Amino acid sequence: MELKESIHQVKESSFRLASLPEEVRNAALEAVCRGLKEKEQEIFAANRQDLAAAEKNRLPAPIVGRLRFDEKKMRDCIAGARDLISMEDPLFRVMLRRQLDEDLVLTRETCPIGVIGVIFESRPDALVQIACLCIKSGNGIILKGGSEAKATNRTLFDIIGQAAVEAGLPDRFAVLLEDRQQIDELLQCDRDVDLLIPRGSNQFVQYIMNHSSIPVMGHADGICHIYVDAAANIDLAVSVIIDSKVQYPAACNAVETLLVHRDIARVLIPALADTAGSRIRFLGDKDTVRLIGCAPATPEDDGMEYLDMVLSVRIVDSLDQAIDHINRFGSHHTDCIITEDKDSAAHFMALVDSAGVYQNCSTRFADGFRYGFGAEVGISTGKLQARGPGGLEGLVTDQYHLKGQGQIVADYASGAAQFRFRDL
Amino acid sequence: MELKESIHQVKESSFRLASLPEEVRNAALEAVCRGLKEKEQEIFAANRQDLAAAEKNRLPAPIVGRLRFDEKKMRDCIAGARDLISMEDPLFRVMLRRQLDEDLVLTRETCPIGVIGVIFESRPDALVQIACLCIKSGNGIILKGGSEAKATNRTLFDIIGQAAVEAGLPDRFAVLLEDRQQIDELLQCDRDVDLLIPRGSNQFVQYIMNHSSIPVMGHADGICHIYVDAAANIDLAVSVIIDSKVQYPAACNAVETLLVHRDIARVLIPALADTAGSRIRFLGDKDTVRLIGCAPATPEDDGMEYLDMVLSVRIVDSLDQAIDHINRFGSHHTDCIITEDKDSAAHFMALVDSAGVYQNCSTRFADGFRYGFGAEVGISTGKLQARGPGGLEGLVTDQYHLKGQGQIVADYASGAAQFRFRDL
């Protein structure tokens, strides 16, 4: 079948999927857990095939690591799905119930967005998480995973699809894309796909945003800042900065630029350089270079996403200068202030225009799991729909229901009837 | 000053605007009400100037009607602003408060979107409504009104801006565009404008959507349906259909296509044609033509937005056929079922994929005022952010705040610390 026709069938299925009660969607998730467990040997065999190909193609070690789907990953996937089952239903929640007039009642209820297209990287466990989030939230699914995980993804997808349909989900509620060229076809399906969630490199996400009229949720850059205020605890600051950079520098929530108040710079920056040792390569403004003898930063380092063990350091004269720098050069992802001063923290949180604004903790906490959302489909730096890590709530929208007894607008326009608003 | 620089200054102001407490924003709205009242003669004089130009340019009567800004419009505008003052603050609402671990607390709070660009039609009262909604919700404002209302808009804008800034809003929180060519410049300001709300013709809205990477909220088409079920009350159906078409046929929430169950068609359609008389021109499928001798509909009439006293009529064999037709040809704006059967209504509401799904009342109720939102910036057929009429809630987003005591992710990754999620 043509890809566009397959995607259209997911759209057609999505209307019925949207109307299924929680019991059916949870039963589907239960069936998925059972199916994965029962067929784990089949999955591991497919994964060995992908790993062998990766080795043959000499893929870098980090990619091979992400590609591996072993018993631990299986346990985590099943635990994640069980967490979703126990979570409150995101659908059919009544957000507003208002009498407009006697016997004319407006309700606003949550409902699925419709069909979600997720393009994700090499980890096959992401396929399981995304599929389970979409099943719980009643959304049709278009998936495209990394080509290096092709065999594992196909096996996982077939097991999940079969289990969910046997448990009552509509046929063809999901489609798996297997060729990179199919992405361009997907980008054109603006009548059938309601939301795209691309995960991957800045360049890739930009490409998706520029080549489709389908709304995109996600982030291109992750340019996170830490600002160390004059009233900071030095040990705490050093520990949080190092974690924010070193714990996983390729992540979008790793810190890229450190801003330090001039009053504390002479103590903080050498202490940081000392503790970091050779783990972090520092680039600094003039005063920082003078303090620790690092390489100088260029103007291009403001707003640079290194995705590596590199940290740009700038000394600032005030809290407001730090805030201006962050709003100007940041990517509105996650930015942190280190301070013991409540007022400075409140000022920073009120004025920094980012999805996450932190005080005294690592920027690496910006993540759906760490926020207790069970999982995430992506982290959004956009301001519409989900901001920050998008879990179940990011996958639902609202619908207005109005039930009357024949009321017409002409009566309200003429004054023959009057609105009598009352929240019920 | 260059337009792009002016827009950038609105962005810069928006951070401070976002941090202002409710008292200041409400005081600004009070000042706006006073300013409008005190300077009403100045406003009426400017409006007379626009009306004279409209007469000279022989603009059509409906446009001249919308252009008029008289004492009644002034009263409505001030009443609308006072309603907004009394409404609950949409900002700083805590949507989530969760302990992730001891002394590591996540909150999700509502905050303004940032800078909103609204391009609206000829009514100058729309300028007042939109500006007041943005002031209440703490958003920076870029406004572009119809050129035929240029003098009125400029006068209103200056009065509102001066009053609000004197009451404590930051300088340059708003900009008024006066030339059509400036719209193209606005569309390029994707770093400074967070959301565009274009109001106007289908073609115009499509143009905006296709020429900017700024997210757009609104609707291009308003293709609304009414489906008359077999179990309908005939008198109620006829009255609701006529209101939905005749009360204001150029509105986006006017009905364009009528679907009638075969079992009731022979009674309903002639009764409707009879009551409508010459007010509505009907186009019908074969069986409808046979019943009332109207002109035949062509396949192009499915999904056609007439914006006129024209109604396309189709007989269907089942509720599901009606639902399929609506999901396929509708624009996901507002669709209504006329039925006395609760189960049919529930099935229709569960499966129709539109912002508003109604039972037994006019589609013309789809409007922010009629929903009790005080006002609306636009009606969205998109599914992200606001769906349906967008009032204050459509103009806010969320921000995550995380406050810790130096927690680092490495400890949670190594198992040295464990998350202890607890909603507070």
Image (cartoon, coloured by chain):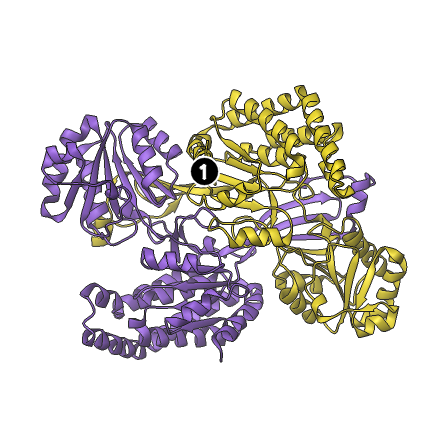
Chain colours: A yellow, B purple
In the rendered image, the quadrant that contains the C terminus of chain A is top left
Q: Quadrant of residue B58?
A: bottom left
Q: Quadrant of residue A314?
A: bottom right
Residue B93 in view, yes or no: no
Q: Quadrant of residue A327?
A: bottom right
Vertical placement of residue A140 versus B59, above or below: above
Vertical placement of residue A223 versus A170, above or below: below
Residue A171 in view, yes or no: yes
- Residue drawn at the location 24% of the way across and 48% of the way down: A409
Residue B234 left/right relative to B210:
left
Q: Badge 1: few (under 14), some or many (20 or more) residues near its Cα, within 10 Å?
A: some
Residue B18 horizontal/vertical position (percent):
55, 63
Residue B382 horizontal/vertical position (percent):
43, 48
| Protein chain holding label 1 | A
Query: Considering the numbered disc 1 on the image, is that residue within a helix, a strand or a loop?
Result: helix
- Residue drawn at the location 70% of the way across and 65% of the way down: A344
Residue B290 horizontal/vertical position (percent):
11, 33
Residue A189 horizontal/vertical position (percent):
45, 43
Q: Amino acid at mark 1?
A: Lys
- Residue drawn at the location 56% of the way across and 53% of the way down: A207
Number of dots carrying numbers: 1
- In the picture of the structure, the residue carrying the numbered disc 1 is A4
